[in-house]
Image (cartoon, helix red, strand yellow):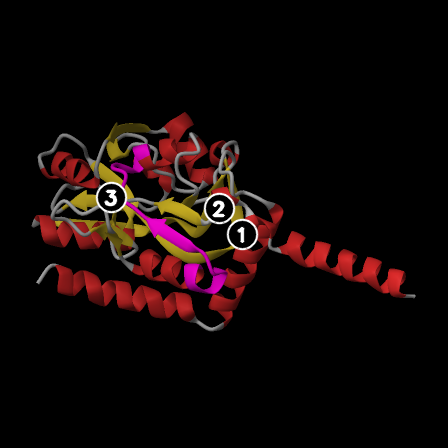
Amino acid sequence: MKFKRLIYSFITLFFVCSGSLVFADPHCDKLTATGNSEYPPYLWRKGGGSKELLGANQIIIDEISKRLGIEIELQDVGSWARAQDMLKAGRIDLMAGAFFTIPRVQYMDYVHPAFLETESVIWLKGNSGVKINKKEDLKPFLGVTVINNSFGQAFDEYSKAELNIMYVSSLAQAFKMLDRGRAEYALYEKNPGKAYANILGFENLSVEGAPISTEGLFLTISHLSECNTPQLRGQLAQIIHELLEEDYMQKALRQGLESWQEFNN
């Protein structure tokens, strides 16, 4: 009887330890994360030589870290293209906000559900005479957007096949090209675009028509991360679900908007 109890205790201990195996792994005492550093109010650079990122997604990552019981270091690694390359190479564990696309599935796992949603829109220069009511209206015009930016799988496929779009390294560069007439429209998300248009002084730029897409922002994990286990993905999914149920994400977004205004005053 004592032997049976001993065996039962061993089996119970095994499953308890297995459920938190990722935290017992010495390689996983900390997770690294990054994101689009030109993406207010979701993420932006603190500046002053700091590698710190601020914004709504930073607030959410900090809360996920607290509930997970493991440190998540959110860091600026450069451009959005470089952030994706770093995750692809396994040099960063987590991406703090990415749209779902088939190419990205090849190198990172998506944690469901999405933690926020964002609208992608068409930006025009005032008095340009360009009128856009649907995506097909973009065909005659030259557009610009940021390298490796996505607007959802459906629009990405359409734009690649049908549209003439230039790709640049930053939103600031894209808006400058639009302002100087080197592009006839720009594609970018609505809230980050408004935030940057204001601080860059592009008061003559405005959103045209309805959003071209509304996409979820997901937390993702690099396929090459040593911490990428079913246990970790399951725990992250549970935490995100709980935060959504508590309306924490929308509170974080409102706080991110307020912080961005304060940051630029």
Q: Dot 3: within a 10 Å radius of its alpha carbon, few (fewer than 14), some, or many (20 or more) residues?
A: few
Q: Would you say residue 56 sits in the magenta stretch?
A: no
Q: Residue at 35% across / 70% down in the picture?
A: 251
CB-based contact (under 8 Å), mark 1 and mark 2: yes
Q: Height in image: 100 above or below 199?
A: above
Q: Which residues are magenta?
A: 65-82
Q: Which sits in the foreground, 62 or 5?
A: 5
**Which residue has dot 2 on it?**
28
- Residue 217 at what x, y percent from top left? 42, 51
Hey, which quadrant is residue 183 in on the image? top left
**Which residue of the protein is positioned furthest toward the right in this rendering?**
1
**CA gap, disc 1 and disc 2:** 6 Å
Q: Dot 1: within a 10 Å radius of its alpha carbon, few (fewer than 14), some, or many (20 or more) residues?
A: some
**CA gap, disc 3 and disc 1:** 54 Å
- Residue 15 at what x, y percent from top left? 71, 56
Q: Amino acid at mark 3?
A: Lys
- Residue 200 at what x, y percent from top left? 10, 48
Query: Does residue 102 appear to the left or right of 198 in the view shown?
Result: right
- In the picture, the disc for residue 23 is 1
